Image (cartoon, rainbow, N blue to C red):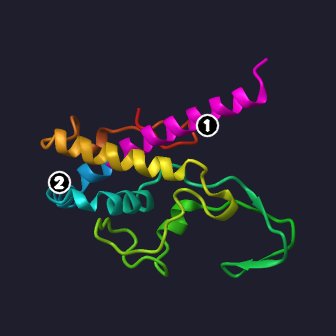
Amino acid sequence: TPSFAAELVRRVLVAGHDTSVNQLGNMFVTLLRHPDQLRLLRDDLSLTARAVEELMRYTKLVSSAQPRVTTEPVELAGVALPRNAPVVPVLNAANRDPSVYPQPDRLDLTRDAPPHVGFGHGPHFCLGGQLARLELRVALATTIKRFPGLRLAVDPDELTYDTGSVLRSLN
């Protein structure tokens, strides 16, 4: 049987690869569905870091985080929850909260916004978050630069996603 360290390395590599690949696909589909934003980025690649953050906020890779348990009584959205109540954080809702993000359903690569929770938060922040940011920045800028005529090969409504996976991934 593999050692604990070997299994940990395997999981980190798989998690880092699968999440970055699938999120990159989601980001390109989003940009191709928003040609004005793609054009903006193509014309000014210095926006790449900001674009990655906005795309992480706007696109969904995972809809919810792992379940949590309240450590004390708390009220959420007008509902009183006792200590030890199970809670499933919905990342997509947090990233589209109108009290945090003006016009949250609009993609805006120039947005100055508070941090998103696409990589989690606090003690649940993704260990590979900084590496993923770097990978996404490099892949996004390089692809846009090398393929200026990039477009979807099919109508966006024909795209299908793997519904059996935790990650939102194109089929």
As drawn, 42 above or below 77? above
Q: Secondary structure at mark 2?
A: helix
Residue ranking furthest to the top: 1
Q: Residue at x 63, y 55 (%)?
A: 65
> Which circle's residue, 1 or 2, is located before the other in the chain?
1
Q: Residue at x 27, y 52 (%)?
A: 31
For residue 159, the mark is: none
Q: Amino acid at mark 2?
A: Arg
Q: Residue at x 29, y 57 (%)?
A: 48
Q: Residues within 10 Å of mark 1 (few under 14, many from 20)?
A: few
Tell me residue 40's x, y (percent): 18, 61
For residue 12, the mark is: 1
- Distance, label 1 to label 2, CA atoms, is 32 Å
Q: Is residue 121 left or right of residue 32?
A: right
- Residue 4 counted in the magenta span: yes
Q: Is residue 144 left or right of residue 136?
A: left
Q: On the image, numbered disc 2 is attached to which residue?
A: 42
Q: Residues within 10 Å of mark 2 (few under 14, many from 20)?
A: some
As drawn, 119 above or below 95? above
Q: Quadrant of residue 84?
A: bottom right
Q: Which region shows up in magenta?
A: 1-27
